[in-house]
Image (cartoon, rainbow, N blue to C red):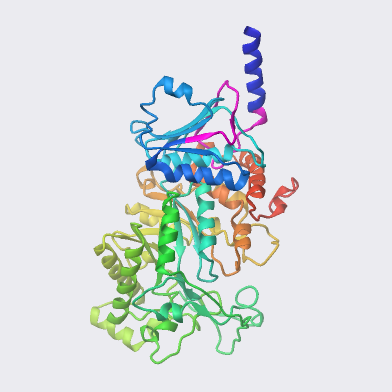
């Protein structure tokens, strides 16, 4: 008998070694159990209370889609993992049990996953925690199709480091349809992210239906071409740009922008947006919509030119990237403009359940306000001393309106200029300076510095295709810490989390989106979720080998250069 037990333990140890745990983001605690592995097959039954049916169905659909195995699902209206008797548990073999346990943890994001040869159980004090446990279970599954899926025997206890774990997608420069947006949300869910920042409006296209202002999508959702090549486009190689103090680049009047002449556009109806919101909510992801103001508004101005600073001008949806003052106007701060924005935001707020509405606030060139007689008159009447103070006035006024609707604004760190809006959340993109300043005055901060977390930058020094002309290797993303060293412990509490951004100037199709985010989204997720003291880049690279195989299983596009052991990412 002793020999049998010893043989069993040795076999379990061998199986554990063969089925190395390669979970990303890395869990807080993983402990192996002295038991044979669990085997998932067509007879395996998922048992879950009806209140978390969406999670059970999510797992069932995933296994069916990628392995061709149809799991049974017991939609049990009374099932309670806490009160299930030992006798009942012993009878329930070949089962995956999902249960919300009210007394499990005060942290609703924490979960525990237990696997043995007879069953798998995942429990948490919230359904959200159960869902995160499911993402971990998915990464314990084999990376190739099989009729039986072997899961090692272990206990995982896990919870996130940051409350805000976000990823962004720009659909203005290039439009992506609903099906792909849902796929993108699934990628975020796989990495335990909980916020999707949907960049819906910009100079290059207005992507959300606003019923009160139909021209926003009739006119503003379409442009007649896109510049050719890297910004500022072919044909401009010999142009020298004049830089004014505190201003962005000015294109000389004789500069010629060459475009491809291809009409591009699209938009989401409000019904489509509701569908995407529901899809994300089922994956415990909150969608934060962004409506840009006062700059990045050329698509809106093309539709409603009376809102601009140049009387009687016929604006066009922008065809060139970048903030070139010849082409990128700003909204005039009139009562008509504020009425328009309040109407738009009212429809947006009524659509999105999110507590947070992103209002942009970045890269507003002051040139247009300086040269506008009407703007100068408004400033004089209101005692606004300069255009920087006008930017602050604009943001404060919008914040007051959004707050009146019970919501909170998020803005890029330019909203600090001239004085921070009192209740705003700062998204720090121009390095960490803005985030540090906000944290020191006890306002929430999302760290998203361009040089660390902009995934539209090239991941190799010599890229396979056209990207933004900056370099952001995998290692830089992984090793970034969102909490600046200069903050003390109390100030650090205001770092809500971090977000990766994907701007789509040079990303025109879903395959390119995947190529740009994978595998850097894995590095991002581990930075957002896992304990700081557990970060280990060589260990991450080792676990990433299994992720690449999972990408292949899921049909995800990524650079095969990562598969070359000699490749350093350069």
Which residue: 49% across, 81% down?
317
Most common SS among magenta residues = loop
In this orientation, does residue 412 appear?
no
Left or right of 535, for residue 417: left
Q: Quadrant of residue 64?
A: top right
191 is within the stretch colored magenta: no
Tell me which segment is drawn in magenta. 17-46
**Residue that lies at the very extreme toward the bottom in this rendered image:** 312
Q: Position of residue 472 (x, y in %)?
A: 60, 57
Q: Is residue 390 visible?
A: yes
Front residue (pair 229, 112) = 112
Q: Position of residue 568 (x, y in %)?
A: 70, 49
Look at the picture and state if 192 lies above or below 34. Answer: below
- Residue occupying image coordinates x 74% and y 48%: 564
- Image: 194 above or below 76: below
Location of the C terminus (image quadrant): bottom right
Q: Nearer the viewer, residue 171 or 4?
A: 4
Q: Is residue 40 magenta?
A: yes
Taking the image as shown, residue 310 lies to the left or right of residue 537, namely: left
In front: 166, or 213?
213
Picture mark count? 0
Between 126 and 568, the one lying in front of the other is 126
**Is 147 on the left or on the right of 504, as rendered?**
right
Q: Position of residue 344 (x, y in %)?
A: 34, 72
Of all residues, the one furthest to the top in this rendering is 1
Where residue 440 appears, as percent x and y from the top left, is 35, 52
Q: Quadrant of the N terminus?
A: top right
Position above or below: 270 against 497:
below
- Asked which quadrant contains residue 460, the reply is bottom right
């Amino acid at each position: 008998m002793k020999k049998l037990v010893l043989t069993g333990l040795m076999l379990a140890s061998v199986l554990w070694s063969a089925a190395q745990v390669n979970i990303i983001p890395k869990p807080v605690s993983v402990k192996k159990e002295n038991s044979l592995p669990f085997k998932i097959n067509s007879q395996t039954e998922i048992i879950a209370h009806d209140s978390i049916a969406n999670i059970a169905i999510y797992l069932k659909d995933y296994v069916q889609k990628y392995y061709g195995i149809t799991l049974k699902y017991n939609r049990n209206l009374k099932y309670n993992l806490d009160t299930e008797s030992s006798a009942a548990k012993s009878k329930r073999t070949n089962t995956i049990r999902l249960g919300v346990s009210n007394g499990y943890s005060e942290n609703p994001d924490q979960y525990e996953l237990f696997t043995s040869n007879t069953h798998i159980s995942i429990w948490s004090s919230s359904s959200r925690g159960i869902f995160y446990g499911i993402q971990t279970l998915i990464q314990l599954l084999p990376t190739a199709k099989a009729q039986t899926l072997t899961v090692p025997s272990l206990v995982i206890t896990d919870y996130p480091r940051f409350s805000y774990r976000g990823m962004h997608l720009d659909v203005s420069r290039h439009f992506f349809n609903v099906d792909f947006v849902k796929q993108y949300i699934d990628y975020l869910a796989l990495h335990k992210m909980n916020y999707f920042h949907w960049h819906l409006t910009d100079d290059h296209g207005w992507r959300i239906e606003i019923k009160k202002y139909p021209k926003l999508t009739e006119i503003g959702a379409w442009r007649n071409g896109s510049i050719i090549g890297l910004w500022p486009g072919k044909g401009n190689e010999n142009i020298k740009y004049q830089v004014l103090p505190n201003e962005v680049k000015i294109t000389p009047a004789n500069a010629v922008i060459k475009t491809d002449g291809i009409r591009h556009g699209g938009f989401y109806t409000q019904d489509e947006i509701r569908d995407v919101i529901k899809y994300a909510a089922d994956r415990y992801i909150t969608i934060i919509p962004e409506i840009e103001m006062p700059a990045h508004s050329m698509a809106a101005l093309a539709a409603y030119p009376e809102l601009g600073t140049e009387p009687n001008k016929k604006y066009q949806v922008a065809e060139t990237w970048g903030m070139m003052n010849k082409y990128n106007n700003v909204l005039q701060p009139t009562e008509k403009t504020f009425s328009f924005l309040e109407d738009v935001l009212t429809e947006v707020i009524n659509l999105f359940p999110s507590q947070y509405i992103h209002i942009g606030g970045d890269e507003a060139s002051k040139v247009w306000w300086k040269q506008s007689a009407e703007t100068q008159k408004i400033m004089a009447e209101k005692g606004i001393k300069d255009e920087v103070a006008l930017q602050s006035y604009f943001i404060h006024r919008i914040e007051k309106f959004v707050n009146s609707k019970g919501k909170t604004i998020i803005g890029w760190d330019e909203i600090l200029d001239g004085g921070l809006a009192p209740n705003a959340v700062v998204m720090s993109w121009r390095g960490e300076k803005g985030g540090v300043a906000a944290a020191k005055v006890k306002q929430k901060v999302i760290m998203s510095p361009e040089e660390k977390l902009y995934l539209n930058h090239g991941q190799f020094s010599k890229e396979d295709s056209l990207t933004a002309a900056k370099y952001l290797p995998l290692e830089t993303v992984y090793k970034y810490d969102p909490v600046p060293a200069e903050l003390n412990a109390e100030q650090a509490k205001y770092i809500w989390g971090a977000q990766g951004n994907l701007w789509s100037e040079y990303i025109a199709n879903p395959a390119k989106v995947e190529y740009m985010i994978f595998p850097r989204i894995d590095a991002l997720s581990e930075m957002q979720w896992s304990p700081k003291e557990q970060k280990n880049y060589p260990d991450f690279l080792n676990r990433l080998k299994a992720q690449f195989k999972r990408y292949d299983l899921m049909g995800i596009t990524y650079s095969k250069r990562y598969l070359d052991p000699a490749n350093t990412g350069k």
